[in-house]
Amino acid sequence: MFVKSSFAITALSVAATLFPAVASADASDDYPIPNRILKTTCTVDQYMAAVRDTDPVYYERYMIDYNNRPPDIEQGARDRIYWFFSLDYAGRRQYSEDTATNVYYEQMATHWGNWAKLFFNNKGVAAHGTDVCATYPPDDPSVWNG
Amino acid sequence: MQIAPVATPRTEAITAATTPITAPFNAQITTVEDVAGIDQGSRRRGSQTNRAVHWLSTGLSAQAKFLPLVAVVAAAVALAAPVHADPDVDFANELHTYGIYGGKDYNAWIGKIACKRLYSGVDQDAYKSAAFVNMQLQKGSTTEQSWQFLGAALRTYCPDKMPVLEAAAR
């Protein structure tokens, strides 16, 4: 009996090793990072100022979360999102792929799980923000004071 | 529980019967206080607080002194009147009179954020605030409703910012 079930488990393990791709999530042009964020030409400051107006409660929640982090994590999150926005479309799309296929790819997320929530987690918020972000000043660090 | 200042014919009759005719206006206020039972009692019998302090300063042990005080505080906490327990409810009720509905918590949060934006300088005047509020209200909301919302929000959550609204009215 024991030998029999051992065989079964081994067979399952072999199958799992042979077909690993079955359960893995692939990135799409809209997941995990919304298409609007992949394509926007706005700066981080422009986008945040826009969301502060278009989805103030969402912005407020993010800033409360941000303000509850230690200073080094806050700085890390800021640096990381500015880095992401410095990428072109292809770079952002690749990053989206990397984070979708490897949960450990984004080190920032191990320190603060929702570090980019304002940018990546809600297509509606991303759409409202990117609709109008170009009308805001490109450089406005006060968006982090919320 | 608020007592309406306007006297109905019935209460007027009672007031007239129990008070001197020379001071009917004062007499009516006294009647209201009698019903409320707060100030009137302390004025007649001397301040309860003063008497308690005097009693505490007599020769009892510290523990014996403070036990009743603890009991009084506990009673005050347990029997705290639920009047104005939640300003968000009052705010929502006022919004309803302007025909503004939607989530109570959502509207309250927008009101508080409108205050915060005035404090932080994101909105420099009431026009900017009203424009911000208008963006958050349901589509089809009028400009008038935005200003009504803003007025209610400032009154409820940041009365010290009311001058901003008054400056826009001039």
Image: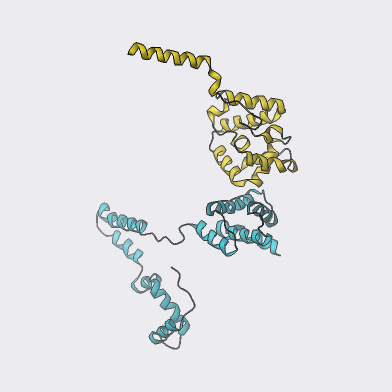
Chain colours: A yellow, B cyan
**Image-quadrant location for residue B12:** bottom left
Q: Can you tell which quarter of the image residue A35 is in? A: top right
Q: Residue at x 48, y 82 (%)?
A: B25
Above or below residue B106? Residue A141 is above
> Is residue A139 in view from this perspective?
yes
Q: Is residue A66 left or right of residue A137?
A: left
- Compared across the picture, whether B53 is left or right of A24 comes to left
- Using the rendered image of the protein, determine whether residue A105 is visible from the camera's viewpoint: no
Name the side, left or right, on which B71 lies relative to A107: left
Q: How many numbered marks does the figure carry?
A: 0
Q: Is residue A49 above or below residue A76?
A: below
Residue at 54% over, 35% down: A69
Q: Depth check: B111 or A70 in front?
A: B111
Q: Quadrant of the N terminus of chain A?
A: top left
The location of residue A22, given as percent across then percent down, is 54, 22
In this rendered view, identify the residue nearer to me: A92 or A82. Answer: A92
Q: Horizontal and vertical percent for residue B103?
A: 54, 53
Residue found 33% across the figure and 55% down from its top: B74
Residue A36, given in percent of the width and then of the height, sits at 68, 36
